[in-house]
Image (cartoon, helix red, strand yellow):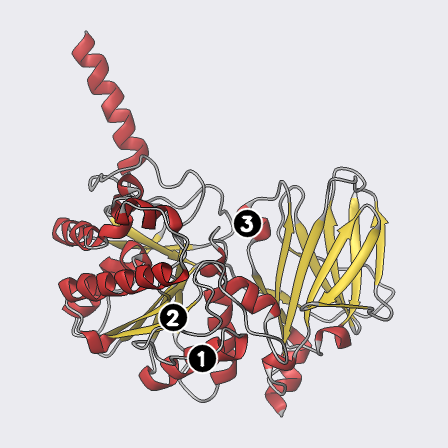
Amino acid sequence: MKSKTVFIFVSLILIVYAGPSTAAEMLPFQRADRILILAAHPDDETIGAAGVIQKALKAGAKVKVALYTNGDNNEPAFIIYEKRLTFRKGEFIHMGEVRRLETVSAMNYLGLNRKDLIFLGYPDFGTMAIFTRYWGAVKSYKSFFTRASKVPYPECLSPGAPYAGESILKDIEKVILDFKPTKIFVSNPADKNGDHRSLYLFLRVALWDLDGSIARPELYPFVIHVQGWPKPRGYHPEFALDPPQQLTGIPWLNLSLTQEEIAKKRTTISRYESQVEYDPPYLFTFARRNELFGDYPAIILKKEPKGGDTKWSGIDLPGGISYAYVDSEFHIKFDLKGRLEKDIGISIFLFGYNKNREFSKMPKIRISIGAFGISFKDKFKRITIKDAQMMYEGHAVIIKIPLEALGDPEHILASVQASGLSLDQTAWRIIELSSKQQIASKR
């Protein structure tokens, strides 16, 4: 009886974890494909897309991997790997070089040469701050651990480039223009890691800038950092990666891997010795029967006249966020269970994009809502937005912003940050203003 009970228990585990993913299967790669993997840190390209690299190379496609950062701010991994405690800035740059060399070794094992790898060298754990604030006539961002304010690695694409939004955007656009990818695999805008989110945002802006200059590539974001996902931890090649339960708004695509591809992915992960020693069960968890890719659909807003019933679009979740485009205003609706208390705050990021204006010169608006009202910042500077309004409607806060204050955008990158929100709700979303797009297409 005992053995029968164990058999039933194991069978139930296999049903839960090893069942086929509900995601649709990705189409096979073709010889004409040009695959670009954009990884936030060394090992992300392997964890998220080692299967992609293998299958693309087997199909005869061209593959390049670009590393956003050298992962030089992972202090816990550094201590365990080096078996010593240090806070000297040079040691962190040394760690970034260790991780760069691990990437070269890992990608060589998968079949890529050094010429297929591009290192950008921007600050680990600092790129979201750069995206949101470090543009234009401001001092460069300074990394907390390395104390660097410019790319310190000679092996990178632009050594000495300042840690500023313009530098990152220029490098990503150069990578895309030089390689002209047909498919880009990149970190997901819902990933909990800020570097993963910002890489997606820089890529989106770069693709808008390059629209019309190159054929538009297909985009395949992959997620890595989601609390409690995937389960169970450890190397389980018999299990499948199912979509994270916290991300319900993404239509997923599945890439099934053979046993040989799974084993090769595991071996590739093991090449990152500095990271495996720190948390081996977590890293090897991603060597499974499949890889997952998916993005949020853009939120398309049609212009409405003032005075009618507002048509809200957005995230239909309890406590969710929705948007509207009314006359020359952008409206945001944030549902609350009650009025704001002193210990509750909401931050709303709104970054507009206009094809006819440099993104570096566009407003980077952060709206803060707290017990004492509403305030606005453009990067570091506190500003006043004329005709902006905040009002309550039942248990909801509604904010109205003149589009002029956002730079008269065609697209808006938006995110809402507040305690208690799900990843779906805090993820960066792309909002398209339909009438603005029509006007831009006629120019």
Residue 31 seen from this side: no
In which quadrant is the N terminus drawn?
top left
Q: Which mark is residue 178?
A: none
Q: Going from the N terminus, do you reach mark 3 or mark 2 first?
A: 2
| CA distance separating discs 3 and 2 | 29 Å
Check disc 2 and report the residue beneath it.
121
* Picture quadrant where residue 400 is located: bottom right
Q: Residue at image x 29%, y 25%? A: 12
The image shows residue 99 at horizontal and vertical percentages of 28, 60
Whether residue 369 is visible to the viewer of this picture, yes or no, is yes
Corner quadrant of residue 234: top left
Which residue is at the front of the view, 97 or 205?
97
Instruction: Name the amino acid type tagged 1.
Output: Ala
Quadrant in the picture for the C terminus: bottom right
Q: Which is in the foreground here, disc 3 or disc 2?
A: 2
Q: Residue at x 33, y 58 (%)?
A: 44
Tag 1, which secondary structure? loop
Where is residue 417? Give x, y as percent.
Answer: 63, 51
Of callouts 2 and 1, which one flags the residue occurring earlier in the amino acid sequence? 2
- Give 154 or 216, whichever is nearer the viewer: 154
Classify residue 160 as left or right of residue 356: left
Q: Residue furthest bottom?
A: 443
Label annotation for residue 424: 3
Q: CA distance from mark 3 to mark 1?
A: 34 Å
Residue at 36% across / 41% down in the picture? 230
Mark 3 or mark 1: which comes first in sequence?
1
Asked whether disc 3 touches disc 2, contact meaning CB atoms under 8 Å apart, the reply is no
Q: Secondary structure at mark 3?
A: helix
Percent across and percent down for residue 240 are 28, 43
Q: Nearer the viewer, residue 300 or 127?
A: 127
Label 3 crowd bin: few (<14), some (14–19), many (20+), radius 10 Å: many
Q: Find disc 1 in the rendering and name its residue.
A: 161
